[in-house]
Image: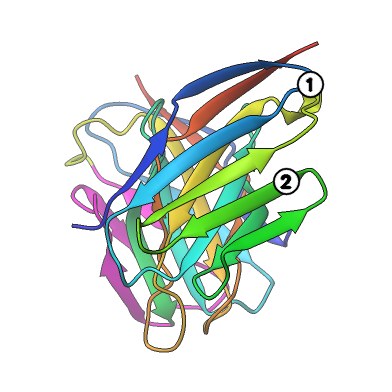
């Protein structure tokens, strides 16, 4: 069935360093790839997403890259700050007309940014 | 935070009891989803609904039931048949069609005593 693998499960970086989280998906028909940030006890919130017609997208300190051939995508956070500490989830779905839009989530990465 | 609410925030249940978790949205979203979150396992889809009076099983539907009588409401019942119901339950909604974000509710933490 559809599957998304996410690595690493935990990541610790010094403030100011970069963090990279990687995901691999199994369904080649997937075309929408969001990233969610979840703080302890709170709801996941979308931080960035990318569609399959684009190879890279950037929003300030956050960027996502997509390699459709290899079926993997990555989240890059530069100049990390303590408030970036949270659990990050990647997801994949088949979006658009006739599709359900249901998300298949990775297992999550706990990011700790040390001051 | 998106107009999607869940209640209660915390719920305690005795073994053998059914409980119903509420999810309401005022975003006029067509599709609604229920996820279960356990530590280290990400979010797993329980049920989803794309239109009123229609819903489909997700990956872990056994022991759960839902209804979608109104567009804005998608309650989840955790039945006594669910063997390990203690978890954090998240409801989400989105507009139908391509390119639309799923918005999450604040979640309900269910504990079986």
For the point 39% across and 72% down, the residue is: A94
Q: Which of the image's four quarters has the N terminus of chain A? A: bottom left
**Can you see residue B103?**
yes
User: What predominant SS class does the magenta segment belong to?
Assistant: loop
Disc 1 secondary structure class: helix
For the point 40% across and 32% down, the residue is: B87
Task: Answer with mark 1 or mark 2, whichever residue precedes in sequence.
Answer: 2
Q: Is residue B59 magenta?
A: yes
Q: Which residues are magenta?
A: B52-79
Chain holding disc 2: A
User: Quarter of the image holding residue B23?
Assistant: bottom right
- x, y percent for residue A29: 32, 72
For this rendering, which residue is in front, A3 or A57?
A57
Question: Which residue in the protein does label 1 denote?
Answer: A82
Q: How many marks?
A: 2
Label 2 CA crowd tier, 10 Å (few <14, some 14–19, many 20+): some
């Amino acid at each position: 069935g559809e599957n998304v693998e996410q690595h690493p499960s935990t990541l610790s970086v010094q403030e100011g360093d970069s963090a990279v989280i990687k995901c691999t998906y199994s369904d080649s028909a997937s075309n929408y790839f969001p990233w969610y940030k979840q703080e302890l006890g709170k709801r996941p919130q979308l931080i960035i997403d990318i569609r399959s017609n684009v190879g890279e997208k950037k929003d300030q300190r956050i960027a996502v890259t997509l390699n459709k051939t290899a079926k993997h995508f990555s989240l890059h956070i530069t100049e990390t700050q303590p408030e970036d500490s949270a659990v990050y989830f990647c997801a994949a779905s088949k979006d658009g007309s006739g599709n359900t839009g249901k998300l298949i989530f990775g297992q999550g990465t706990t990011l700790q940014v040390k001051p | 935070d998106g107009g999607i609410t869940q209640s209660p925030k915390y719920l305690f249940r005795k073994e053998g009891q059914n409980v119903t978790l509420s999810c309401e949205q005022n975003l006029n979203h067509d599709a609604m989803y229920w996820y279960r979150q356990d530590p280290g396992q990400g979010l797993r889809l329980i049920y989803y609904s794309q239109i009123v009076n229609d819903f489909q099983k997700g990956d872990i539907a056994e022991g759960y039931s839902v209804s979608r009588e109104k567009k804005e409401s998608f309650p989840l019942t955790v039945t006594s048949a669910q063997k390990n119901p203690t978890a954090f339950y998240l409801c989400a909604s989105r507009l139908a069609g391509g390119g639309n974000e799923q918005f999450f509710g604040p979640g309900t933490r269910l504990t079986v005593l």
